[in-house]
Image (tube, helix red, strand yellow):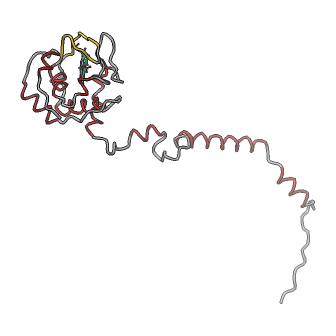
Amino acid sequence: MAAKKKFVNTDPLDIDREKYFSEANSRLPWWFIVVFGYLVFFAFQYTSSHGGKFNYRVYEKYSSLAQLEDSQPVGDVDPLFALGKEKYALCAACHQPNGAGLANLAPPLAGSEWVLESDPSRIIRIVLHGLQGPITVKGEQWNLAMAPLGESLSDEEIAAILTYIRSSWGNEAPAVSSDTVAGIRSDVGSRSMWTAPELLDVPLSSE
Ligand code: HEC
């Protein structure tokens, strides 16, 4: 059994180790603090901008809650509604994005008795063939003209738009099917713009 070696201080400088290490540990160089601080700041910024501002619902690939929600499947929302919302841009030019209409341009769709009629036969005709002359909407008289849009929109698109306007801005009326639109399109054929009295003569199926 070898004899235990005795520890000998061979340090040529023979420094006071205790003093040396405690001072070295307690003093961080100034540049290290600056660089480290910048890194923390940068990491925070990066995580914030890429992680939806620390929202726990936002996950990788999405950088904000709005972006994430936009790309989610519409779930139990009728796909017609989603299509209608998109295609409504065409009508929004006149009837406004919030459906409130605009003086001398177009009457409101929000709260309109025409839109809310549970049988959509009349509004389908308005979109297909257009409308002109005096019409009363929500107690107000309008006397303008809306061009026919039947040529530029498919049955499905018309059904979708009408479904959308019938369940937006507080409106609550049943969805419209493309079959109903197709039926009216082929029954009526091509014709001139409707007037309100003519539309009121169109028989409605009672609920
Ligand atoms: C170029 C402007 C314009 C566009 C685009 C337009 N409309 Fe109209 N719309 C009018 C005007 C003007 C009237 C009223 C016509 C009148 O005074 O006889 C009207 C009337 C209506 C009415 C009946 C009155 C009411 O307010 O409820 C409905 C329903 C309607 N539009 C739906 C639509 C839908 C749906 C679209 C899109 C597919 C659309 N409109 C696109 C101008 C427009």
Closer-to-camera residue (113/165): 113
Most distant residue in the bottom direction: 1
What is the x, y in percent for residue 164? 28, 32
- In the image, is residue 124 above or below residue 5? above
* Quadrant of the snapshot with the N terminus: bottom right
Nearest the viewer among 24 and 166 is 166
Quarter of the image with the C terminus in it: top left
Ligand 1 quadrant assignment: top left
User: Where 122 sits versus 179, above or below?
Assistant: above
Give whichever of 158, 104 is nearer the camera.
104
Instruction: Kindly identify the residue that appears in the image at 83 percent across and 49 percent down.
Output: 27
Q: Between residues 19 and 192, which one lies in front from this camera angle?
A: 192
Q: Is residue 57 left or right of residue 132?
A: right
The image quadrant that residue 134 belongs to is: top left
Which residue is at a point 17% across and 24% down the rendered structure image? 122
Residue for point 26% across, 11% down:
141
In this image, 204 relative to 20: left or right? left
Q: Position of residue 13 (x, y in %)?
A: 92, 60
Residue 41 placed where, x, y %? 65, 40
**Picture coordinates of residue 33 (x, y %)?**
75, 43
Question: Is 10 placed left or right of 87 in the picture?
Answer: right
